[in-house]
Amino acid sequence: KAEGLSLEIAIEYIRTGQWEEAHKVLVPIWPQLTWRSSGWFDLMAEFAWTLRECAQKVGDYETLMWINWELLNRVFPPRPEWDYNLHRCLQDVDVGSPKPTIVLRAGDVISCLSASLVFEKAQGNVGEPLQLQLAITSVAQPNSAPITLSEVKMAFEGGLRPIVLHSQEPQESETTSDQISTVPLRDSADSLDSSTLSSPTHGLAPMIGTADLKFHPSQ
């Protein structure tokens, strides 16, 4: 009820052109919005679109990116004629230089990408290769533009070395269907593009590979 009342107050501010006041009402509520955890996506979408408009007006690029990331998820009612392109969501906002870093944690948002990681074996021996499978799935709006990641980083507890996957060069023939590929890894010590990512416990240098990190809706 309090969230609905805050939304009504913000809408009244917007009607009188008081964008900063509307933004101040909505932005503190957004991270802990109960409609997100309760699955009331229609109400959450109304809140999100209203806050997005406020964030656009006041130049709040962090909130703008966060909202666009969530609204890309297909659980939300699609907005007709809207350009669902994450890579263009900040084109009308001055973010300054260098480009900002925005951190979104999976447990706090309704993500448009999901990831899972499984090992081939529950246990392994020292010095023996250990196979694993990483699955990344797009649950973005059906009419959205593909999402391209520059890299994917995986860090592990214990003695396992971290893994960094860089986006490979675009292929001549692009596919929108599911893909399964084997990614060979190399030691970052032998590469000029070594990553700064290290194991959170042992500071181990990462293993590096390249993969197709462009994801179409439902891929």
Image: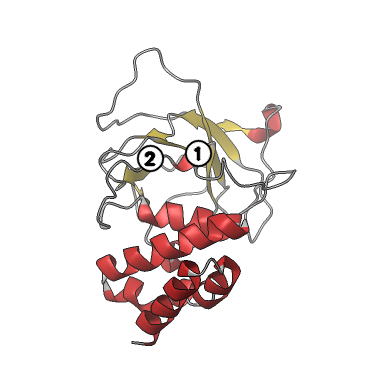
- Identify residue for label 1: 88
Whether residue 115 is visible here, answered yes or no, is no
**Residue 134 position (above or below residue 71):** above
For the C terminus, give its image quadrant. Answer: top left
The answer to which of marks 1 and 2 sits earlier in the sequence is: 2
Indicate the position of residue 8 as horizontal and vertical percent values: 39, 78
For the N terminus, give its image quadrant. Answer: bottom left
Indicate the position of residue 28 as horizontal and vertical percent values: 54, 76
Decide if residue 133 is on the left or right side of residue 16. left
**Residue 198 position (above or below residue 85):** below
Tell me the element at label 2: loop
Nearest the eye: 159 or 145: 145
Tell me the element at label 1: helix
**Labelled disc at residue 192:** none
Residue ID at (32%, 53%) = 73
Disc 2 residue type (three-letter): Asp
Indicate the position of residue 39 as horizontal and vertical percent values: 26, 71
Cα separation between marks 1 and 2: 9 Å
Q: Looking at the image, how many numbered discs can be counted on the residues?
A: 2
- Identify residue for label 2: 83
Residue ID at (35%, 80%) = 4
